[in-house]
Structures are given as C-alpha cells and as structure tokens.
Amino acid sequence: MRDQDLLRQIQDERWISELLVRFDFDLRRTENGPVEAVRLPDGGALEMIAGDASGGAFLLAGPPADSRPVVYAGSEGEGGLIAADLRTALALVVGLPSLHDATSMPFGDGAALREWLAFADDEIREDWPELDDDRARLRDALGLPEAAGLLAGLHAAAADERYRPVSDLGDVYEPMTS
C-alpha cells in the first residue's frame, strides 16, 4: 500500500485517526505546520503529515513517491530519520511507549533498551489498560509489523546524517539517539 493510501485510510476511518492521537500521532496538527520550517541537509523537501503533543512533527522526505522516508523533527531541536516508509514509522509509533523512550539510550545489544521500554509500557498500562488491545487493533487494521523487531533499524536510521532536519536559519537538529 502506498503512503498516500495509508494516510487516506487513517483519515477516512475515524476510529483509526482518533486512536492514533492516543499514540501521539495526530493528523490534525499539520494545520499549523511544524514549529519551524525545516528541510533536509541537501535542500530536499519535507512534508508534514502529523504531529505529536510536544510540538514535534512527522514528515515525509523527498519528492512524492509511493513510499517515502519518515523524518521526525522535535520541538526541542532534535530529529532525524525514523523509518524508511510510513508503515514502519506507524509500527514504531503504535508499538513503542514513545520514540523518545526508544531513542533515550544506546541500542547496544538491545536488552537494556527493551527492559526500559517494557517498564515504560507498564507505566502507561496503569492509565490505559486497553493499550495492548488498541495496539493489536491498529496493527490489524493498518497491516503494521510488531515494533520490537524494528528497534535496531530505528537506531540505525536515526544516525543517518542525510535526514537530519535543518532549519531555515541553517541550524542542524541534534541527533535523536545518544
């Protein structure tokens, strides 16, 4: 499925777009655009498709195509590539406590990071007992893979300097990973 078809499905099926807001992927946040205008280091365009509650933006990179890389530009000046395509980006957003949690420590062998993410999920479940069921519903409806197998790819993607957002003033965003 093409990125545009996936976005259209999210827009057309209200329950999906409303549930994605709980996962901090809100299509309505595009109305005001990102906190500041950003581009790729090579001057390439970024198209905002959603935002999060902290003022961050999810952006499709490059010219229109069936599938485009997804870049995150945080409101605190951190950002980078999160996935090679929208479906993978959504799998991360839905399957992880947050992108911030998933990039808050080095990947290493992944064990410490997975333990941290499990702890964060347990904290979320205290206020959102349906978390796992809601994740499963979205994965089924959108054909998303499980996020656990995508952590190493997220860390590798976030290190790709070609996708680090740059402001109109020429300021390069900080890496999302440590």
Image (cartoon, rainbow, N blue to C red):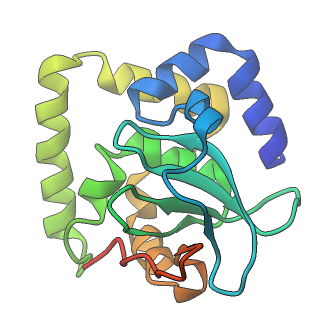
Q: Position of residue 68 (x, y in %)?
A: 75, 62
Q: In which quarter of the image is the N terminus?
A: top right
In the image shown, does 91 or 64 lie closer to the viewer? 64
Query: Where 129 sits versus 110, above or below?
Result: above
Query: Where 37 sits versus 169, above or below?
Result: above
Q: Where is residue 154 in the image (x, y as percent from the top left)?
A: 44, 68
The quarter of the displayed image where residue 140 is located: top right
Q: Position of residue 83 (x, y in %)?
A: 57, 64
Whether residue 145 is visible to the viewer of this picture, yes or no, is no
Q: Position of residue 49 (x, y in %)?
A: 66, 44
Question: Is residue 104 left or right of 36 when viewed as pictured?
Answer: left
Q: In which quarter of the image is the C terminus?
A: bottom left
Q: Which residue lies furthest to the front in this view?
A: 169
Whether residue 29 is visible to the viewer of this picture, yes or no, is yes
Residue shown at 58% from the left, 78% from the top? 163
Residue shown at 40% from the left, 42% from the top? 95
The quarter of the displayed image where residue 111 is located: bottom left
Question: Is residue 129 left or right of 44 when viewed as pictured?
Answer: left
Question: Is residue 24 left or right of 145 when viewed as pictured?
Answer: left
Residue shown at 62% from the left, 38% from the top? 30
Query: Where 64 sits versus 81, above or below?
Result: above
Q: How many labels does the image show?
A: 0
Residue shown at 50% from the left, 76% from the top? 157
Query: Where 25 sits versus 40, above or below?
Result: above
In the image shown, does 97 or 44 lie closer to the viewer? 44
